[in-house]
Amino acid sequence: MSAQDQIKDTVEKNDVVLFMKGTKMMPQCGFSSRVAGVLNYMGVEFADVNVLADAEVRQGIKDFSDWPTIPQLYVKGEFVGGCDIVTEMTLSGELDALFEAKGVTYDKAAAEKIREANAP
């Protein structure tokens, strides 16, 4: 199976997927850590793909999404974005709305706490 097929298969078979450096329990870069931390805190079940474990997947995900950086978040097969976009969406409530629209379970109270903690 090619890296592209493997990526496509992973994105299609999991409601939420984070392609990241490291794992959700042991991120290996600050940006991956931030996105995994948000998802973990909000109680979102997600598959994590450690791109450091496979150079073909690491490059393949960039080609697949036409997005140059990692981490990359997918929800129900749709590319959402990287760390900056996920952070913005979390703080604006857009990530909550996306999860609700796509039928993804998350802890709304935890999402509110993130926004409260980051309010100006």
Image (spheres, grey):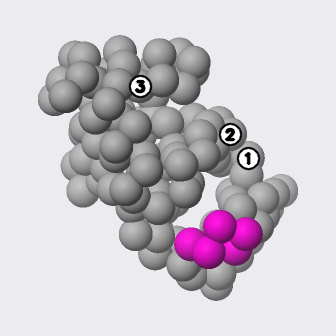
* Label 3 SS: helix
User: Mark 2 or mark 3: which is in front?
Assistant: 3
Q: Identify the residue shown where x is 35% and y is 25%.
A: 4
Q: Residue at x 42, y 46 (%)?
A: 11
Q: Please tell me whether residue 80 is drawn above or below residue 55 in the rendered image.
A: below
Left or right: 101 in relation to 53: right
Q: Amino acid at mark 2?
A: Ile
Q: Crowding near pointer 2: few (<14 within 10 Å), some, many (20+)?
A: some
Q: Specify whether 33 is left or right of 58.
A: right
Of residue 33 and residue 95, the one placed in the foreground of this image is: 95
Q: Tell me whether the residue at label 2 lies in contact with that at label 1, contact meaning CB atoms closer than 8 angstroms.
A: yes
Residue 57: where, in percent of width, then height? 28, 24
Numbered circle sitting on residue 85: 2
Q: Position of residue 89 (x, y in %)?
A: 73, 52
Residues packed near mark 1 inside 10 Å, few (<14), some (14 to 19) or many (20 plus)? few
Q: Looking at the image, is 69 positioned above or below residue 15? A: above
Q: Quadrant of residue 119?
A: bottom right
| Residues at circles 3 and 1 in contact by the CB criterion of under 8 Å | no
Numbered mark located on residue 88 in the image = 1
Give the alpha-carbon distance from disc 3 to disc 1, as whole Å.
Answer: 22 Å
Residue for badge 3: 61
Q: The magenta stretch spans which residues?
A: 100-104
